[in-house]
Amino acid sequence: MKLQAAIAGYDAGKTTREELTREQDAACLDSIQRMEATGAPIVSDGEQRASSFATYPITDTLAGTGLAENLAADGQYFAIFTDGHHRQLPRLTGGPFRYKTFAAEYVEKAMKMATRPLKQAVIAPSMLSLLYPLDDEVKGYSREKFLEDLCNECERDIRKSFAAGAKRVSIDFTEGRLACRNDPKNPWTGRRMLEQFIELNNRVIDRFSAQERTDIGIHTCPGGDCDSTHSADVDYADLLPSMFKMNAGYFLIQLASEKDKERVYKLCGTHSRADANGVPQVCFVGVINPLNPRVETADEVCEDLLVASRHIPKERLGSTDDCGFSPFSIDVKPKHGSPDVARDIAFQKIASRVKGTAMASEKLGVG
Ligand SMILES: [Zn+2]
């Protein structure tokens, strides 16, 4: 909440950049230390320097302070959530398209704070492709030229993160499930864009060697903001067969909050590939629901993984949280009571995941 107050102050011109950076430093350090204390083998800085998982390369805050060049604030909704709120992307007004912030900046700072390996999230080219107007042509900057620039920036984002010291880089792909939604209130979701999203993302992923792709993953979820989702009603069977066509080495799959988990484990077992152009696809199944304040027990986590292991080869099975605990910097976490309460609960949940995963590993004779 202190960090959120600093962001609001920065938007209002009352907080300096230096003061905001100081709060971000403190929040990231706290995230790393508390995550390491859970025993997690790989940690992150909680993405607490980012405006959101999707907009970090192009704006400093969600209110639009520090918006990158050639962008206007009034783009399409990238998601409308079930509680009625929405999040909006900027709109491209000209070329060239360039990132103003690369995730590697966060990695560099986190490397100085962490004692364990770091993972870094980056945004998928498919999400940022929505910056280009759905039907209109941007004057003097064709869609194809934009996509070429976009792919180059995404590739750079991943390479720079590794170079800065990240052990793993995960590509956020929340728009994958939403692409199957067909919501008349949000026109792009009705354009059957999933296959072109997959193709676009592979345009970037395929620039990496098999060895590099072992450490490049994809995250799928039905969204998570203000304890609400945007596409939980889309059948996973509409997404997963396409999703595993991306030649990534691992997938972080929201699953704890699914009604019929075993059906999704089966889909993952059927459609994930033992050989995706040289890499086996590891399925990290969600065992923790960040939208629900109830802390899962280690026994529940263990049981989920044992059931999953009946459908997914155990050497390609892992656990994860369903989504980020606050993928947007201004999330108020209403079901939790407050962002600070949610923060404490988050670390309890991660501790349960770590403990329950260790229990399952032992029972399965792996790890
Ligand atoms: Zn997510």
Image (cartoon, grey):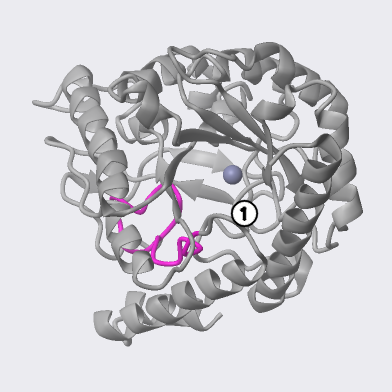
Q: Is residue 66 left or right of residue 244?
A: left
Q: Is mark 1 within 8 Å of ligand 1?
A: no
- Which residue type does callout 1 highlight? Asp
Q: How far across and down, in percent of the image, does residue 220 sit? A: 59, 34
Q: Is residue 178 above or below residue 296?
A: above
Q: Which residue is at the front of the view, 147 or 204? A: 204
Residue drawn at (44%, 21%), measured in percent from left and top?
197
Q: How far across and down, in percent of the image, does residue 106 sit? A: 34, 61
Residue drawn at (29%, 62%), measured in percent from left and top?
108
Q: Which residue is at the front of the view, 195 or 90? A: 195
Question: Can you say which quadrant of the picture contains the N terminus?
Answer: bottom right
Question: Can you say which quadrant of the picture contains the C terminus?
Answer: top right
Q: Is residue 274 above or below residue 328?
A: above
Q: Is residue 330 left or right of residue 297?
A: left
Q: Give the dominant element type of the magenta stretch: helix, strand or loop.
A: loop
Within the displayed image, which quadrant is ligand 1 positioned in? Answer: top right
User: Which region of the structure is painted magenta?
Assistant: 44-61
Q: Residue furthest left?
A: 140
* Mark 1 crowd level (few <14, some 14–19, many ≥20, 10 Å Cα): many
The magenta stretch spans residue 326? no
Helix, strand or loop status at disc 1:
loop
* Whether residue 149 is visible: yes
Q: How far across and down, in percent of the image, does residue 314 sit? A: 73, 28
Q: Which residue is at the front of the view, 221 or 309? A: 309
Q: Is residue 149 above or below residue 273?
A: below
Q: Quadrant of residue 79?
A: top right
Q: Which residue is at the front of the view, 303 or 337? A: 303
Residue position for label 1: 225
